[in-house]
C-alpha cells in the first residue's frame, strides 16, 4: 500500500514486497506480505493500479489476514491466539482514485 504503517508487537518478522510495473499498457501489480515468524501469522495486501489517464490513478486492493498456526500462538485461559489472528475483521477491500494536478 502507498500509505503504510507497521507497529511490531514481536521481534522477528518477514516483510516481502513485490512491484511489477506495466503488466499491460496502463496496469501495475503490487503486493506486500508481513509474516510474524514466531507464530506464522501475517497479512497479505495485493493491489492493482490502473493509470486511466496520465493524471488519474485508480487502485483496487485487499487486506487478507493469515491466521497462523495455533500450536505456535500464545495461550491465555485455555484459548490460543496468534498476532494477526486477533484482527477484528476478516478480508477488507478498498478502492482509491487519485488525481494529480
Image (cartoon, helix red, strand yellow):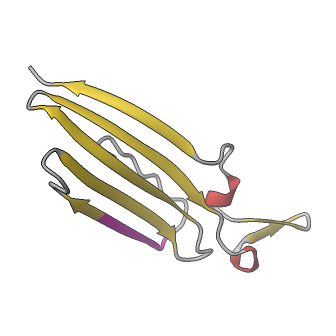
Q: Position of residue 4 (x, y in %)?
A: 36, 45
- Along the line of sight, the residue nearer the viewer: 47 or 37: 47
Residue at image coords 75%, 80%: 71
* Corner quadrant of residue 65: bottom right
Q: Position of residue 52 (x, y in %)?
A: 18, 32
- Classify 11 as above or below 60: below
Spot the residue most to the front.
24
- Along the line of sight, the residue nearer the viewer: 41 or 29: 29
> What count of labels does the image hold?
0
Q: Position of residue 73 (x, y in %)?
A: 71, 72
* Corner quadrant of residue 64: bottom right
Spot the residue most to the top.
101
Residue at image coords 16%, 44%: 26
46 relative position to 83: left or right:
left
- Classify 9 as above or below 57: below
Q: Position of residue 43 (x, y in %)?
A: 51, 59
- Along the line of sight, the residue nearer the viewer: 6 or 34: 34
Residue at image coords 58%, 74%: 40
Residue at image coords 42%, 52%: 6
Q: Main secondary structure of the magenta part?
A: strand
- Along the line of sight, the residue nearer the viewer: 77 or 45: 45
Please check the rendered image and state whether residue 12 is part of the magenta-colored stretch, yes or no: yes
Spot the residue most to the bottom.
71
Can you say which quadrant of the picture contains the C terminus?
Answer: top left
18 relative position to 22: left or right:
right
The magenta segment is 11-17
- Classify 2 as above or below 10: above
Amino acid at each position: 500500500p502507498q500509505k503504510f504503517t507497521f507497529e511490531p508487537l514481536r521481534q522477528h518478522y518477514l516483510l516481502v514486497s513485490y512491484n511489477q510495473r506495466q503488466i499491460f499498457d496502463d496496469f501495475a501489480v503490487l503486493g506486500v506480505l508481513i509474516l510474524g515468524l514466531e507464530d506464522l501469522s501475517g497479512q497479505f495486501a495485493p493491489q492493482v493500479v490502473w493509470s486511466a489517464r496520465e493524471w488519474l490513478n485508480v487502485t483496487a486492493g485487499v487486506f487478507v489476514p493469515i491466521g497462523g498456526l495455533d500450536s505456535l500462538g500464545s495461550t491465555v485461559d485455555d484459548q490460543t491466539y496468534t498476532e494477526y489472528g486477533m484482527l477484528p475483521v476478516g478480508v477488507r477491500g478498498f478502492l482509491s482514485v487519485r488525481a494529480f494536478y
